[in-house]
Structure formats: C-alpha cells, structure tokens
Amino acid sequence: MLGRSVSPVFVGRREQLTALADAFTEASAGNATAVLLGGEAGVGKTRLVQCFAEQVARDGARVLGGGCVELSTDGLAYAPFTAVLRQLVREHGTGGVAGLLPDGAERDLARLLPEFGEPSGDGETETGRARLFEQILTLLERLADDTPTVLIIEDIHWADRSSRDLIAFLSRSLRVPQVLLVMTYRSDDLHRQHPLRPVLAELGRVNGVLRLDLPRLSREEVAQQMAGILGSAPDYTDVEKVYERSEGIPLFVEAMLESGGDLAFPESMQDLILNAVERLPEETQRVLRVAAAGGTRVGHALLSAVSGLSELELEAALRPAIAGNVLQISDNRAYVFRHSLIREAVHEELLPGEHQRLHARYAEEISKNHRLVPPGRAHVELAHHWYGARDDVHALTAAWNAARKSFKAFAYTEAVPLLERVLMLWDRVPGAAERIGADHTAVLEKAAAAAQAGGEVDRAVKFVKAALSELDEAREPHRVAGLIVRWSNLKIAKGQMGVVDDLRHALKLVPEPGEARAEVLVRMSQHLMLRGEAAEGEMYVEEGLRLARELGDRCLEADLLLNLALGHSIAGNIEATIATNQRALDLGRQENSGRVITRAIGNMIDSLPDTGRWEEALRLSDEGWREAKRFGRLRASGLFVLNNKAEALENIGRWDEAVETVERALSFGPSLRTRHHLLRVRADIALARGEVELVENILSEIGVLKERPEDFVQDITNSARLHIGWHMLRGEPGYALAVAERMLARPAQSSKAMLGWRLLALLRTVCDAAEDVEPDRVRAVREQAADVAAHLSVTSPVAEAYRLTYSGDFDAAAAAWERLNRPHNQARALVRAATVAARAGDRDGAAARLATALPRATALGAAPLVAEIEALSRRVGGAQRAQEPSELLTPRELEVLRLVALGRTNRDIAKELFISAKTVSVHVSNILAKLCVTTRGEAAAAAHRLSLLSR
C-alpha cells in the first residue's frame, strides 16, 4: 500500500469547498477579503486549499501561495510573503513586479528579496514597516486590476509576529474587488497564550473576513476515503475499526492503511505517524532525520552537504521516501515532508547529541555558502542552527547579525527575541562586546527601539530601564538623554504623566548645541504645546529652529514649525496656525518627507474648518490619505488624517459619513491615544442622537466617567465636555454643573474655537438648565465662565459663532452657524432663540424658529433635539411646516431602507454598502424612529406609502 496512502477521491469537503468558492465570488464583488480556515493537525486543510486553488485557477484566477514554517518563531520574518514575491518574480521578473508599484517602492521589497536591489535607507524606523505593508497591499491591488487574485498562506499558527501583523493589516485594508486571502491554521495548537488567538479575535470583527472550521470526517466519509486509497470498497468491520481509532482524522486514516492488513493502531500518535517512516530503508531513515533537523523545507544541495552524501547517493536514499509519500519535491530542488506532523515526529526521535551535531553541521555548511538557503534567510537560519547546536559563541554573533538583518527588513518584533538571546548569552561568551562591535547597553538600546517600533510598549520600557541603569550620566550624557526621550514617548503611549520633568532633566544633560539637544527640544516643545504651556514651548521651538538651521536639517526644522503651529492652534490663533503649517508642509514636500507631509496635512485639516473652509479640509483629507498610503504611514499619520476628517464631517452634520470614517480608522488597530480621539468623535454623534448606552460605553473605555488624569489641553477639554454632555443627556444638570466647576478650576482654557469657546457655549446650556435648582452654584459658574471668556480671543468665524451662543445672542448664532453649514449647531441655536421668544410672549416667532429647526434635527437623527423641539412646539401652540417625505431620511438611510424593503438582513446590507453590521443597526433604529414604526415590515410599508423608494 506504500505510495497510495492519499485518496485520489476528494472526500467529505464539498460544503467547505463551496464556502470557499462563495467567498471568492464575494471577493470578486468587493464584499469579502479573507477566509480563516481552521482545523486540527492532519484534518485535511492543505488538501482542501489545493483543490480550491486548482478550481479557481481553472476559472482564470491567479493563485499565489506561501507557507509559514516553525523557524518563523525564531526570527524568520515575512516567510510566506517572501515566498509569494519569489513566485511573482519567477512569473513576471523583477521589472514586471516593480512596474506595479510607485516609483522607487520596489526598494522596500528588497528588504525581503535581494533581487529588487538595494533597500531604501531613509532611516525612518518607526514607519519603515508600515511602508512595507503598504507596498504589499498596493502590489495585491494592482495584480487584481486585471486578474482575480487568491493569496493562500498556510500554517499561520507558526507565523512570525511581523507576518501576523501584515496578515491583519491586509485583512482590514483590502477593499478592492478580486482579491481574496485564504489562511489556514491548526486550531488544536492555539493554547490560551498563543499569539495567533488575539489576531483571530480581531479579524473576526472585521467585515468581509469569514471563519471556516474544517471538521473531522464522518464514518461514511472515512469509508469513502478508504475506498479511494484501497481501490475497492472496504469491509464494514475495517471501516468501524479505522473510524473508531482514527477518530475521523484523514492523516491517521492514511497512516492506519499504511500499517498493513491488520490495521494496527500503535499506542502513541507519534508511533502511528512514524509507521510509514520505519518501513523505509535504514539509510533513508537516517537522511530523513537529517532533513527533519533542517526544518520543514530543505534544499537538495544543503541536504547533500550536511548528510555527507553525493547527489547520486542522496537521490538513491530519498527515492523510497518520495515513493512512499513521506517526502515531496518542492520548487527549486527542495524537499518538504508531506505533513508537518511527520517532520515533527521524526525530529522528536533525534537523540540529544545527534540533535546538536546536526544543527552544528547545518550551521557550518550555511556559513560556508549562504546560497544553500533561499536569499535573505542565511542569517536567521544560522542563528537558529548555532543555538540548536548549543555553541554559545557562534549563537551570540549569529543572533546579533540576524537581529540587524531583521531591522533592515522592518521585522522589529522578530529582532526582539534575537536580541534577548544575545543578552542571555552575554555572560557566557568572553569578549562578547568585541565580537559584535557593540556593548551590552547598545544591545538593550537596540532591543528598546525594536520593541517600540513593533508596538510592544511594556517590553520597550523594560529595555530602556535596564539600559539607563547601566549608564553614567556624567560620562555618557547624550546616550542617557536619548533614552529619556524614548522613555517619554513610551510614557505618553501608556497614558502616564510626568513626561515634562523627564524631558527637563534630559535638556540639562545636553546643554551644548547639537543633534542630541535638538532631539530633546523637538519632543519637549511638542509636549509643552499640547499641555497649553505655549510661552515656554515657543522658547524651545525658537532654540530648536536655530539649531536645525545651523545643522542644515530641514526635516527637523519642519517638525519644530509644526510644534509652533500646534501652539498657535491651542492659543486660538488660527491664521498663524494655517500659515505655519503651510511653511512646514512646503519644507516636507521639498525634502519628500512622508512624516512631515502627512503630519502637516493632518494639522491643516484640523484648522481649516474653523475658518469655514470645510470643503477644502475634506479635499485635503483625501490627499492626506493618499500621501499616507504612498509613504507607508496609514496606521500613523493616515489615521490622524481620518480622525480630523471625521471631526470635520461631524461638524457639518454629515454624521453617517463621520461614523463610517471612524469605524474605518478603528479597523486599522490604531494606537491607544488615536483610538481615544476617534472614540470622542463617535461619542459626540452618539450624544447628539441620544444613544445613551453607546455614549456610556465609550466614555467608560476612555476613562472619562472616572475622570482619568490627562496631560493635554485638548484631551482634558473634550473629555470634560463629553462628560457634561452625558449628564445633560441623562437629565442630570446638577452633576453636569459639578463637572463644569472642576473644569473651570483649572488655571487656563484654550482660545481654540473647538475647545474653549465650544466648552463655554455648553456651560451656558448647563447653567440655564440648573438655574432653578442650584441658583448659587450657577451664579458662581457664570462668573467664572465670564472671567474665562474675557481672556479668550476670537480669531475665527467658528469661535465667533460659539461666542454668540455663549453670550445668548441665539438668533445671531443661528445665522452664523447657517453660514458655516453646521446644521446641528444652527438647530440648537434656533431652539434656544425660540425658548427666549416664547418667554417674551412671541409665540409665532418661537413657532417659526422651531419650524426651521425641526427638519434639520430630524434629518440628522438628533432624537433628543427633535424631542425638545416637539415639546416646545406643543407648549407654544404654533403650527409647524409639514415635512416632505424626502426630508425624513438621510441619503444613507434611504439606501438602507431600500434594502430593508427587499428583505435583506443587517449583515447583507453591511456587505452591499461596505459598512459594518453595527452601523446598519443604528441606521435601522433611526429609520424606525423617524417613520414612527416598530418593525422592519412596517418600515417597508411606510416607505412605499410615502413613495420614499421611488426617489
């Protein structure tokens, strides 16, 4: 039976094959991006994806494939994507692949495949990996322009951290038709601490990602598999025996049939898997043990060198293993075990001494000739094998070299364990510093940089503290200052306080002009501006600008200008903010610095709406997103751009688009601080729409309800404003007043329109609501607010509109908001003006204002404001203008209603409109409320009755 252990009949997987085909169809329409195929070891995942690949290839699709190997956990970064690039180069050549990317972008791919030339050397450690991710994304999108493309990545349970991050990025970011990712993993390997578990959980929440589980075979399916292998129908008793003992695992069925006519089942799984190996000649078994030590895939030349056999002798020894389907021939004259379980079982049979000797032999041969392994893998293979050989000296130097190679490939998370290995071996190796050309502290510094770049904040803090403990400030002040700057960045990422004191200390360590002091000045000035301490911040900016110009560093100059613009913004000096941002943007474009360009554009998007130039801000946000994508900065500056775009959309009442923008940004897994910014925008819309539970969830997450200490003026002000709004939504003006009192007790407020003036306008509302029950407290708050207002400047139309609201000139405020195209603010001002008119006895005037406000509030879905308008209308008794049916719903709500009327589910609608099911649920709730119905069927009937769907 040897050699016929795989059934020629594809058994029991039609349902899963159909699901994959359906996913491919959905991907062709742009409604799906990825399939996660899970199953136990040996259950048939590879066979299933092979059949799927053959099927779609026959239909004209391009199939790309790459697999993760166990060595990935030892630092072999991007293994599956390197394999895919190698496949594309074979098919199209390096020129053809490079032609699919922006000019020069192929240099980023050179970090994975040397065929693309010299890697880019811009030195932007924190963005290099993001840029590499963007180039892979762009490559897949361009490939799919003319041909449907399927990317299959097997065994992602072995994926390195960088590959996992890239997989998650592609699954979230692929939004073009005709691309599908199919990934397989061993579900039985995912213990509670397995690094893939959080990735799977995250991707499970991404629209367009399908989870597919591959079950064991049923008794009938085992019988079909046996018949396919045996060539005839098996006996019933044999089927029962095989099914009972294999438990429906196809690989075990094959192993039992390979064991002979008695269908013996060894005591251990390993013995079962090794049955086929032990039937091979002894020399073949010896070579298989050598191959198992080399990993899942071993090249012919390397195996020949390590085994000591000539090519002919090696071929003779391996032929029985290939005939017996234990070993298979891969591309480029390489051998792979038919199943990783077989390799693992063979490897487990190695004796301790044999294990070390074989790893030493692999390391020796690869050291002599790097071409024995695929391009770019030699350093990581050497680190793996020297460590396996227990050769501390070579293991240390190899780990250091592999870590440096990982840095060049932006594989920072793979560099960390390699550097930790260097640190672990340090005391065992005499003269370690001389061997690698760096002292122990330098290794810690590099580990800190790698951990921070990979987003492992706590790990980075550990390395920074260890490095600082080894340094003497008096002897190496520059190194200490640099580490303090890094620590300050990590503290900010963790939401910790005390950064300014750290940076003041760093400045004292580097009193002389130079690059070290300039680095501290950039961080110090930015932090002071964010805290609202503009005078001191500007002092450091001016010093930094002088240094930058002396050093001829135009990017440093631009960074400092952006810090200066930030100070102008917090101070409310809008024209100076825009002008200074523009100067920095011009410098960034001259230097082609992605960091500067995208940061400057993000700042401009924030500033322009305050002058009423919201259309320009939205156009610029599209440009900013494109630039962030071009420079590989989507998860950094790109999400900053999206956040400011969402704020602009929220301001002008395009709330559905704002919500979709926020959700899109959140799907990229932003940093904690960026996530909090995005959630605050979402909370503003939820407050205006009366979504109490959602508001509470958001405010709990960002720490507002417990008033978590914050350092930056913008965060403090916006969190306080949301906290006040939450209490007002719940009908708790007294609690809102308490938050206002604590906020006004702070030493100063920002003159920025969307901060200080917006807060004061809200405080006017709070005081008016609480005056009857807390007159003394309200009086004190009004006095404090008046004192604050006297010190705030008015330098923009938005600031003036908020000032008018705060001062109680509501009709003028409503007119100002109308000019600025801010319908919610306008409607609220009209309601306040109507209240004043009603109290003055002008019932008709009040009714007229309410009639203008109602359609605006209704169109926005601002339920609390609609309820307030209706209540006041009943009190004044004025007639309201009848609404046209088309004014009831927003354009997006009409699209959703049309699909509801067709009987679509929320998930179906989400796929068709490229939004989340959660967003669809919100739209449906708003539609039911606006149409005064309680069910989807009633909504559909109302839509037809009002002729809403014919428009």
Image: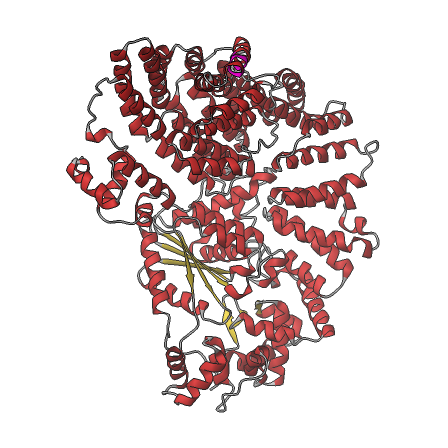
Query: Magenta stretch?
Result: 777-782
Q: Could you say where residue 911 lies in the image, as x and y percent from the top left?
A: 33, 48
Give above or below for 467 relative to 339: above
Closer to us: 408 or 656: 656
Please give the name of the residue rendered at 37% of the width and 70% of the height, measured from the top-left corner: 13
For residue 442, what is the image quadrant? top right
For residue 76, what is the image quadrant? bottom right
Q: Could you say where residue 568 lies in the image, as x and y percent from the top left?
A: 55, 17
Give above or below for 665 relative to 776: below
Q: Is residue 68 visible?
A: no
Quick check: is 781 in the magenta stretch?
A: yes
Give above or below for 739 relative to 133: above
Give above or below for 660 relative to 316: above
Closer to us: 538 or 85: 538
Closer to us: 774 or 186: 774
Q: Could you say where residue 24 lies in the image, as x and y percent from the top left?
A: 34, 57
Q: Could you say where residue 503 lies in the image, as x and y percent from the top left?
A: 70, 28
Total count of labels: 0
Please give the name of the residue rendered at 43% of the width and 29% of the height, measured from the top-left corner: 729
Quick check: is 530 in the magenta stretch?
A: no
Q: Is residue 431 left or right of residue 339?
A: right
Q: Main secondary structure of the magenta part?
A: helix
